[in-house]
Each structure stands twice: as structure tokens, then as C-alpha cells.
């Protein structure tokens, strides 16, 4: 597929046709009522997908009740299918409102004579234990089933006991003695005891129960010394300690005791695995001397597997500052152990040792602590990388780990960049394809820290590209390598001019690659601001796609790149370049509208390009305004206007007002970038930096122009963006912004005589030239959505007919319920998480001919209600009570925004509207009676006129 690699693009184009929730549920209900078992099974297995697509309480409640009825009346195979649906829909179970009815239908099968049916009932109830944790009848059923003589039913009872013990404190406390008696009883078979022991790991709801369970398990250890029992009990104790946290020190000591005394290999290895689990939640809770015990064991052991497991435990512990601080000295036991094994011939051990040393060194760099032995660590790392790349036996995980260590050392100390670049460059063309891809990724990561270090490798990278371009039919692996090598070239030449040789090589590579690889190369070129290369690639791809939408998308990219090429051109005046760029951007925006579809509207892309075109138009208008000083003299009455308005800048006439208009234009452009920033909840950090810098450019120009044409002079401009760890893509853009800020500072240094001089105009022209010459790196979010978060709303009440209004009686209030679900892509929470949803309901009275403006002002009929709700398993609900103080037609607008962990609100939408009609009260009009003229005290209302007619 050639096009935009966006998660939301073409997501639902394949598979079943799009339909609403009621239609889908009706279709599945027909399958459930079928007389054929196959149709019933087909309908049942489609329910989990229905829940994911329409996860609203009404639908889920109705669906599970239907499935419960099938469970009650169907055969065991259908019951098994219903059980699988319940297991796959765990996060939607709490939306069931008729829990009693659901349990009644399922539980009715427990009285069956078939033990398989009873076992399926138990497992189904266990799958929904989160919504029925305190059902006493189910608790009693579990107790009864544990005493059954059928093995299948007992195994199901053990399964449901584990589920209920995890959710119910009452059940856990009540069953503790029962489980204890069964485990210690002689009548219970050994295999059943092994299944019963894991139930105890969930009995951590209170301190006393957890302590009792722990004592029971410790008493069982010497009673059942068999290997399976020891491993099961130690695992149970480990899970229990990880849940309670208070037992972590005693559990670590217990595991260390078995690690020392038990001679069995399986027990020792599992003890180290359990210690690895204990290190993740509570490394700071480990008792003193525990790490030394592991180190002593690692120093004494002769087994490489035991040493590797011990180092993996220490590796987790070194992620916390405590252990790194204790072992920062080169003479410490930990560093001596890792230094000894960093040159091991067994690559996994060497990689773990170097990773531990790297984490200690990086901690010292971060805390500004002097650390010794870094040269030895780097030499060991270089040796390991060479061994992994020369070795015939492949260790991809260890190579990635070693290269990650290199990137960490280069990131914390930039002096190491050049050294690692030189090492990796020497192995770039002499390893197989998989290793080459990994090395290219590492080179890109280090090059993003300091792109200049890649310059010595440019010749080697170009030679590799020439070799790949000479292959007639390159494989998929080779095309991937070509894309990554081209990306390295783009990184290397960021901020530099291209020579013809490198340009020809890139063109030659794209001529022999497949279309998707060429698109990726063009996308990478645009991200680093090399628009000339991107224009050549996109221009060749526009006619080689099968879809009209993809065609217009590529036309959009081609026009955008051509517009940026026009800006960077050295031919012609800056006014002509800007004019051409604006024209190409307008063509790109038109093509982008043609590439959009109702389900994939490309909203971010369209807004980003529209603001860019608006920004370039503002620059063009500023240049035309600067020329006014020479070609449009002030009018004769300029002095009079200046005296009248007490504004000395009005003496310059037309240019003053035009410059102030430019200030407003740039301010509006900056506000548009701010709004775009607030909608980009799923954007990567580099994209947000890109938008911030572009906004700061608008603010900079606004301040510079304002200091020329008004008294609000500001001395310089301070960039509000954090530039310490700025990504490589945005550095050239930021350099241009900084250079423009330096020129803008010189405007403020001019003597303030409240005059607009040619010097001011010249400085503004220079600022525009600097900003135009800064290449635009198109952000990654323009092409790829790595994190996809969307909100789907269901608003009630709804009109009976789509497009009609909701009728509300005069003087009554309308209850509006907003339900919604948060839908995620493949990587939820990659950059930021949804902590809350801000729901806003706006009620606005629509003006009509009968309602005068004065009446609307007298009674404010508009209202805005806001509520912040916390989603539960990606579901949220909010309720509002709206009053309508007067009759008429109202527009209800429901907006949803997302709040992240830091409390920032992102205006992600969606927005829905409803129309509410309130009947207007008839006005009472007084009439006069005949013969009563002059008597103003006698008045009859219009409604009583029928009384006069009777008389």
C-alpha cells in the first residue's frame, strides 16, 4: 500500500460493512434464535467485537442477558462459547446493570446432573467474578463443588475460587480455613493440593489474613519437600509479598535461604526468577546484605546460567538510584564482578555486565559524581560490539542491548558520540542484513544527538547505497537498509548544502526501489527539511497508485515540497518566492481536501498546512507593508490626526495602520498554532516541539513589528521552548528563530523617537529573510500516528427522527446524559495517558424574527455547563440538567476534551449538536370594552373575548 501510514487511515475499509449498534445487535440476535447450532455459535463469537466497537452499557447489558439465556437453554458447546465471550469481555462486565438476572440465568444450570455443565457454570461465574464478588450463593456453590467427586467440577471450583479470592475479601477470609484444611488433609490428592496452593496468593485483603496465609505456606515448605511443591509454595509467597509489599524483606531472605541451601538446579533458578520479581516493585525494601548474598553466589558459581540469572536480578536493582549510589566506587564488589565478566566469552553474560556498569556510570553522570573506570567500560563495550558483529552465531538481543548502552553513554557524555560512530561505521558494510539494520538504528540515535559526528561516515554510506542500487531486484531486507541509510544521509546533511554526487545516488536508489520504500525515503527527507529530494520522489509516485485518495495525498505532498523548494531557492526576489510558495500551498490544501474521506478527514494535516500558508501570506503582506514607507508618503492631514489621536506614529500615515494590521495577523496565526497544539494529544514530542517553535516565530514577528509601530517596545524576545534536548529535526528551525530574535533585539536597541525609519524596515526585511531561509521540517505526526486515542459519544435523549428537534415543555428542565468510550490504537499511552475527560454542554438560544434583540439581552438564555469525569476501563458518563428560561429554539453543543496526568486539557473532540424546541408562551394582550372609554381601570384579556361575544 502506498500512502499515509496512519492508524486511523483505512482502518475499517476491510471486513464487515459499517452499521449502527442496533442493526448489529439485531443481526446477532437472529443468529442466536436460529435452530442451527453453527449459526448460534457464529453469532456468539462475534459479540466480543461488537463490544469493542460499541462499548455502551445498554448494548452490553442487553447482549449479555441474551447470552445468559443461551447459556441456560443451550448445550454445553454453546455454554463454552458464552464462557469464552465472558472471558474476552472482562473490561466491559461492569457495564451490566441487570446483574441479578444475568446470574439467575447462568446459575440455574448448576442444578444439572451433568458435571460438565456444572463446571461450565462455575467457570462462567468465575469469569464475571469482578461484578459479583459478594454473592453468598456463589460462595456456597464453590464450597460445595470443592467437595465434589468429579475431577472436572473440582478443577472448575478451584478456578472460580482463585477468581473470587482475588476480588472478594469476605470470600478470601471465609475460605482460608477451608483451603488450609484441604491442603493439609490426607484425603486430598497431591495434584489437587498443587492446584489449591495458588489460591492463597490472592488472600491479601487484610494484614491478619495475609500473615496467616504466609505462616501456613512456610509451615508447608518442610512438610512437602518435593520440588513441585517447593516451587509452587515459593511462587505463591512471592506473589503474596508483591501484593502486600510489607513481606518483601522476609520473602527476599527466604528465597536467599533456598538459593544457598537447596542443591536442586530448578529450585535455585526459580529462586533467582522470584528475586527478579521482587526487585521490580520494591528494590528499596530489600534488607541490608541481600545484594551481597547474590554477589557472593555469582562470584562462587561456575554455572553460566546461574550467573546470567543473578546478573539479571542485579540489572533490575541498578535501575534504582540506591544500588548505583552504593556501588559507584570502582573497588566495590558489584563493579569488580561486572568488570570481571564484561570480557566473558559468553556474550549474554558480557552484555548484562556491561549494561549494569553503564547504568552506574550514567547515574554518576546525571548526579555530577566523578566516576572512575569509564575508559575500561567503554573499551569492554567496544570489544563486545565487535565480537557480536564478527561472531557467526547471532545474538540480536545482546547486540541491541550493547548498542543501547552505547547510546546511553553518548547521550550523557557527548564526547563519546564520535568514538561510537567511528566504531559502528567500521562494521556497517561487513555484517549481515539484520545486524546492519540494528547498527543503522544505533547510528541514527547517536546522530540525532550530534549530527556532525556522522560526516566522516558519509562517503561509506554513499558507497553502500551505490552497491544496493546496483542490485536488480533488491530483497525486502535490502530495501529497508536502503531506507535507513538514506535517513542517515538526511541526518548528516541537516543544515548543509547538497552536492551533486549525493543527490544522484539518492535518485539512483529511488529508481530501483519499490514504491513503498521510495515513499518512506521521501517522508524521511521531508521530516529533516530536504524538500528538493522529497519533491522528486513524490512527483514520481503520484501516478503510480490505484486509489484516488492516495493520488491526491501524494499530490498534496508534492505541492507542499515544491512550495518549500521555492522558498529555499536563491533565484528571484523574496517576494516572488513567497508568492510562489503560497500558490503551491493552496494547491496542496485543495489536493488534501480531495484526499480526505468522511471517516479519515486528515484534520491535523489540513490545519497544519492551512496555518503554514497563512503564515507565509502574513510574511508576504509584511514585505509589501515595508515597501509602503518608500512609495506611499503620509497624507497632508497626518499631523492633525496624530495630534487628535495623541499617537505620534500616525504621522507616517498608511504604513502605521498596515503594520498594526500585520501585528494582528501574526497574533492570529500564533493563536492558530496554539489551538493546533491543543488538539494534538496523540502527537509525539518532536511534533509538539515543531508546533511550539512555529508559534514562537509568529510571536517573535508580532513583537518586532509592534515595537516599530507602537510604544509597546520590548527589549528582545525570549524563546519559551525548552531547547536543552531538542530533536535534530527542529534544530535548523530553531537556529533560524534565534537568528531572527537577535535581529529583533537590535530593533529595540534603536533610539525610540516614535518614528518609523528605513533602518527599522530594513531590519524587518532581514528577519523575514532569515525565517524564510529556515527549512521547515514536517513533523512525524503529519505522516504517522503511533498513539491513537479517540472518543466516541452517545448522547441521550435523541430525537425519534434524525434531524428533528427535541421538544421540551415550558418551565421544565431537560436531563442530558453523555456516555462515552475511549478507543485506543495499538500502542495506548505511548506518549501520554487519559486521566480525565472534560465534558462541556453549551445551550444557545437561536434568534428569530419574533424575538427582539432587547428581549434576548433582558433574559440571558445561554448557558455553559462543564463536568470533569474520570474514565473507568475507558468508559465515562456525565449528566447535566438544563433549564430553558424562555421559549424558542435552542442548539445544544456537547464537547469532549481530554485531560492528561499533568492536568493539561487537550481539545480532541468530538462535538455533537442537538436541537431543542421550547414552545413560546402566548402574550396576554389587553382589549377595551365598548362604552368604557376613558375608564382605564376596566381591562379584559384577549382570552376572555368569547365572554363578550356571548353577551
Image: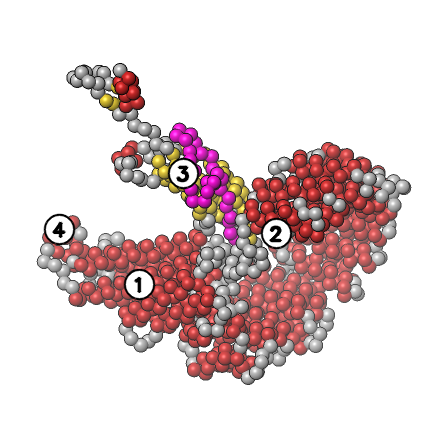
For disc 3, the neighbor class at 10 Å (few under 14, some 14 to 19, many from 20) is many
- Please report the residue visible at 48 percent of the width from the left and 67 percent of the height from the top: 547
| Label 1 to label 3: alpha-carbon separation | 42 Å
- Name the secondary structure under disc 4: helix
Residue 321's place in the image compared with 531, above or below, is: above
Which one is earlier in the sequence, the residue at label 3 or at label 4? 4
Q: Position of residue 522 (x, y in %)?
A: 47, 72
Q: Which is more toward the observer, 566 or 154? A: 154
Q: Which is more toward the observer, 386 or 343? A: 386
Q: Which mark is residue 916?
A: 3
Residue 38 visible somewhere in the drawing: yes
Residue 172's place in the image compared with 374, above or below, is: above
Query: Is the residue under label 2 in contact with that under label 4 (CB below 8 Å)?
Result: no
| Label 2 to label 1: alpha-carbon separation | 48 Å
Which one is earlier in the sequence, the residue at label 4 or at label 1? 1
- Name the secondary structure under disc 3: strand
Query: Is the residue under label 3 in contact with that under label 1 (CB below 8 Å)?
Result: no
- Find the magenta span and give its range: 789-816
- Name the secondary structure under disc 1: helix
For disc 2, the neighbor class at 10 Å (few under 14, some 14 to 19, many from 20) is few
Quadrant for the C terminus in the image: top left
Q: Residue 49 carries which label?
A: 2
> Which residue position holds label 4?
643
> Which residue position holds label 1?
617
Q: Where is residue 402 in the image (x, y as percent from the top left)?
A: 63, 68
| Label 3 to label 4: alpha-carbon separation | 54 Å
For disc 1, the neighbor class at 10 Å (few under 14, some 14 to 19, many from 20) is some
Amino acid at each position: 500500500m502506498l500512502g499515509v501510514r496512519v492508524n486511523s487511515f483505512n482502518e475499517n475499509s476491510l471486513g464487515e460493512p459499517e452499521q449502527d449498534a442496533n442493526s448489529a445487535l439485531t443481526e446477532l440476535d437472529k443468529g442466536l434464535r436460529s435452530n442451527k447450532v453453527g449459526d448460534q455459535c457464529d453469532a456468539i463469537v462475534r459479540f466480543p467485537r461488537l463490544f469493542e466497537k460499541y462499548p455502551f452499557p445498554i448494548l452490553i447489558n442487553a447482549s449479555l442477558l441474551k447470552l445468559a439465556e443461551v447459556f441456560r437453554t443451550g448445550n454445553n458447546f454453546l455454554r463454552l462459547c458464552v464462557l469464552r465471550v465472558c472471558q474476552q469481555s472482562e473490561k466491559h462486565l461492569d457495564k451490566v446493570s441487570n446483574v441479578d438476572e444475568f446470574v439467575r440465568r447462568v446459575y440455574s444450570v448448576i442444578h444439572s446432573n451433568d458435571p460438565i455443565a456444572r463446571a461450565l457454570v462455575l467457570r462462567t461465574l468465575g469469569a464475571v467474578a469482578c461484578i459479583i464478588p459478594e454473592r453468598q450463593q456463589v460462595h456456597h456453590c464453590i464450597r460445595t463443588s470443592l467437595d465434589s467427586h468429579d475431577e472436572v467440577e473440582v478443577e472448575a471450583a478451584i478456578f472460580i475460587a482463585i477468581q473470587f479470592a482475588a476480588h472478594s475479601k469476605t470470600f478470601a477470609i471465609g475460605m482460608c480455613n477451608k483451603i488450609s484444611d484441604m491442603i493439609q488433609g490426607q484425603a486430598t490428592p497431591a495434584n489437587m493440593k498443587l492446584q489449591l496452593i495458588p489460591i492463597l496468593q490472592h488472600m491479601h485483603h487484610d494484614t491478619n489474613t495475609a500473615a496467616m496465609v504466609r505462616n501456613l505456606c512456610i509451615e508447608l515448605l518442610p512438610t512437602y519437600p518435593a520440588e513441585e511443591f517447593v516451587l509452587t509454595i515459593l511462587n505463591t509467597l512471592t506473589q503474596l509479598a508483591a501484593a502486600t509489599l510489607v513481606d518483601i524483606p522476609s520473602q527476599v531472605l527466604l528465597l536467599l535461604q533456598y538459593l544457598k541451601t537447596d542443591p536442586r538446579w530448578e529450585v535455585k533458578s526459580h529462586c533467582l526468577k522470584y528475586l527478579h520479581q521482587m526487585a521490580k516493585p520494591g528494590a528499596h525494601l530489600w534488607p541490608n546484605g541481600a545484594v551481597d548474598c547474590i554477589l557472593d553466589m555469582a562470584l562462587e558459581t561456575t554455572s553460566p546460567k546461574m550467573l546470567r540469572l543473578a546478573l539479571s536480578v542485579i540489572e533490575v536493582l541498578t535501575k534504582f538510584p540506591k544500588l548505583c549510589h552504593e556501588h559507584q566506587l570502582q573497588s566495590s564488589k558489584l563493579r569488580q564482578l561486572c568488570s570481571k565478566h564484561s570480557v566473558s566469552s559468553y556474550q549474554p553474560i558480557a552484555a548484562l555486565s556491561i549494561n549494569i556498569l553503564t547504568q552506574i556510570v550514567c547515574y554518576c553522570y546525571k548526579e555530577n559524581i566523578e566516576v572512575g573506570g569509564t575508559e575500561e567500560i567503554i573499551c569492554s563495550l567496544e570489544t563486545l560490539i565487535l565480537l557480536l558483529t564478527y561472531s557467526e552465531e547471532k545474538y540480536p538481543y545482546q547486540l541491541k542491548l550493547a548498542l543501547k548502552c552505547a547510546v546511553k553513554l553518548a547521550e550523557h557524555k557527548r564526547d563519546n558520540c564520535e568514538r561510537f560512530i567511528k566504531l559502528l561505521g567500521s562494521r556497517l558494510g561487513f555484517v549481515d542484513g539484520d545486524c546492519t539494520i540494528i547498527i543503522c538504528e544505533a547510528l541514527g540515535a547517536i546522530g540525532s544527538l550530534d549530527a556532525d559526528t556522522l560526516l566522516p561516515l558519509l562517503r561509506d554510506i554513499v558507497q553502500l547505497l551505490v552497491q544496493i542500487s546496483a542490485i536488480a531486484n533488491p530483497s525486502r531486507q535490502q530495501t529497508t537498509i536502503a531506507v535507513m541509510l538514506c535517513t542517515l544521509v538526511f541526518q548528516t546533511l541537516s543544515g548543509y548544502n547538497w552536492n551533486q554526487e549525493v543527490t544522484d545516488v539518492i535518485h539512483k536508489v529511488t529508481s530501483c526501489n519499490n514504491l513503498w520504500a521510495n515513499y518512506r525515503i521521501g517522508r524521511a527527507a521531508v521530516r529533516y527539511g530536504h524538500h528538493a529530494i522529497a519533491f522528486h520522489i513524490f512527483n514520481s509516485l503520484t501516478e503510480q497508485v490505484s486509489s484516488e485518495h492516495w493520488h491526491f495525498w501524494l499530490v498534496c505532498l508534492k505541492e507542499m515540497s515544491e512550495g518549500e523548494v521555492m522558498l529555499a531557492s536563491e533565484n528571484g526576489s523574496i517576494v516572488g518566492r513567497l508568492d510562489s510558495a503560497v500558490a503551491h500551498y493552496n494547491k496542496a490544501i485543495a489536493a488534501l481536501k480531495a484526499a480526505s474521506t468522511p471517516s479519515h478527514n486528515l484534520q491535523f494535516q489540513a490545519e497544519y498546512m492551512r496555518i503554514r500558508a497563512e503564515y507565509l501570506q502574513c510574511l508576504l503582506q509584511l514585505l509589501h507593508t515595508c515597501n509602503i514607507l518608500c512609495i506611499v508618503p503620509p497624507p497632508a492631514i497626518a499631523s492633525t490626526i496624530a495630534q487628535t489621536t495623541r499617537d505620534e506614529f500616525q504621522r507616517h500615515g498608511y504604513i502605521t495602520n498596515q503594520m498594526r494590521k500585520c501585528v494582528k495577523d501574526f497574533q492570529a496565526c500564533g493563536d492558530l498554532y496554539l489551538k493546533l497544539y491543543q488538539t494534538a494529544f496523540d502527537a509525539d514530542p518532536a511534533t509538539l516541539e515543531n508546533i511550539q517553535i512555529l508559534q514562537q516565530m509568529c510571536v517573535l514577528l508580532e513583537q518586532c513589528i509592534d515595537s516599530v509601530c507602537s510604544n509597546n517596545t520590548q527589549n528582545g524576545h525570549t524563546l519559551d521552548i525548552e531547547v536543552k534536548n531538542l530533536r535534530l529535526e527542529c534544530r535548523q528551525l530553531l537556529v533560524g528563530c534565534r537568528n531572527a530574535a537577535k535581529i529583533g533585539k537590535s530593533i529595540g536597541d534603536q533610539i525610540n523617537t516614535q518614528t518609523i525609519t528605513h533602518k527599522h524596515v530594513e531590519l524587518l526585511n532581514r528577519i523575514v529573510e532569515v525565517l524564510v531561509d529556515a527549512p521547515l521540517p514536517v513533523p512525524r505526526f503529519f505522516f504517522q500516528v503511533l498513539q491513537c486515542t479517540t472518543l466516541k459519544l452517545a448522547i441521550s435523549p435523541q430525537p425519534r427522527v434524525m434531524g428533528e428537534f427535541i421538544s421540551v415543555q415550558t418551565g421544565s428542565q431537560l436531563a442530558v446524559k453523555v456516555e462515552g468510550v475511549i478507543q485506543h490504537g495499538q500502542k495506548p499511552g505511548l506518549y501520554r495517558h487519559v486521566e480525565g475527560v472534560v465534558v462541556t454542554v453549551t445551550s444557545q438560544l437561536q434568534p428569530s424574527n419574533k424575538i427582539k434583540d432587547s428581549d434576548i439581552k433582558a433574559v440571558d438564555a445561554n448557558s455553559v455547563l462543564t463536568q470533569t469525569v474520570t474514565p473507568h476501563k475507558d468508559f465515562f458518563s456525565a449528566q447535566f440538567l438544563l433549564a430553558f428560561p424562555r421559549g424558542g429554539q435552542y442548539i445544544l453543543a456537547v464537547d469532549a476534551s481530554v485531560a492528561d496526568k499533568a492536568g493539561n486539557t487537550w481539545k480532541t473532540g468530538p462535538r455533537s449538536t442537538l436541537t431543542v424546541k421550547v414552545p413560546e408562551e402566548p402574550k396576554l394582550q389587553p382589549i377595551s370594552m365598548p362604552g368604557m372609554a376613558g375608564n382605564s381601570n376596566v381591562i379584559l384579556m384577549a382570552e376572555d373575548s368569547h365572554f363578550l361575544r356571548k353577551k
